[in-house]
Amino acid sequence: MLPFETSRLMLRDPRITDLQPLTEMWTDAAVAQFMDDYGPRDPAGVQEWLTQIVRALEDCPESNPSSVQLTLARKDDAAVVGWLGLGASSRGVADWDFGYAVHPAHRGNGYAAEALAGAVDGCRRRFGIETFWGECHRANAASARVMTRAGFSEIASSDDGNRRFVLGSSTALASA
């Protein structure tokens, strides 16, 4: 898949060479705290996860995928600052949902909001995806700020009390 760009970031396909920074990110306690059961938790798990993503991209590049996995890399020095995954939602709140994580050394720089806004814009233009939604733990104020800064609006909390955010308009969003 061709990459998406923002003013400071290249949102590109993951590469095996991303292993070290992605391992540092995925094994960080703050990532584990808020990702629930999604994502790898140890170095071996990160290696397996990344290898599967890279292999899938090599085996079956799609012009209109059901999901995208993106490495967030700074344009100025190619440093990997995080990950963003977007894909078809199974919960009926919007067309696609997403998850993201930022490497501990790069938090607080606005990369997550910039990447999310850029990826949403790119997915709309390239794949015709109209609506997006995300959710964060009640205690995760930083994630709530990311979604708001990326243009999402907060809607009613989910059944478990997590905060829910949407971008786009549809009948599904009105009833979420």
Image (cartoon, helix red, strand yellow):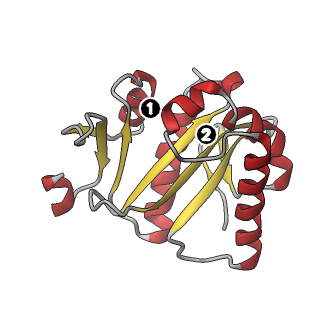
Q: Position of residue 35 (x, y in %)?
A: 51, 38
Closer-to-camera residue (96/76) = 96
Q: Residue at x 61, y 39 (%)?
A: 7
Reading the image, the residue beneath label 1 is: 146
Q: Residue at x 40, y 65 (%)?
A: 129
Secondary element at tag 2? loop
> How many numbered tags mark residues here?
2
**Residue 50 in which image quadrant:** bottom right
Closer-to-camera residue (153/162) = 162
Q: Is residue 74 above or below residue 172?
A: above
Closer-to-camera residue (6/116) = 116
Position of residue 109 in the picture relative to residue 129 (left or right): right
Q: Bin the neighbour count of mark 1 within 10 Å (Cα to Cα): few under 14, some 14-19, many 20 and up.
A: some
Q: Residue at x 52, y 48 (%)?
A: 118
Mark 1: which amino acid? Val
Position of residue 113 in the picture relative to residue 111 (left or right): left
Q: Which mark is residue 7?
A: 2
Mark 2: which amino acid? Ser
Residue 14 visible (yes or no) = no
Q: Position of residue 47 (x, y in %)?
A: 79, 51
Secondary element at tag 1? helix
Measured Cα–Cα span from mark 2 to mark 1: 17 Å
Identity of the residue furthest to the right in this view: 17
Name the N-terminal-most of marks 2 and 1. Answer: 2
User: Quick check: marks 2 and 1 in contact, CB under 8 Å?
Assistant: no
Q: Position of residue 16 (x, y in %)?
A: 83, 54
Q: Residue at x 54, y 47 (%)?
A: 38
Kindly report which numbered mark, 2 or 1, lies closer to the viewer in this rendering. Answer: 1
**Residue 103 in which image quadrant:** top right
Q: Bin the neighbour count of mark 2 within 10 Å (Cα to Cα): few under 14, some 14-19, many 20 and up.
A: few
Q: Which mark is residue 90?
A: none
Residue 70 visible (yes or no) = yes
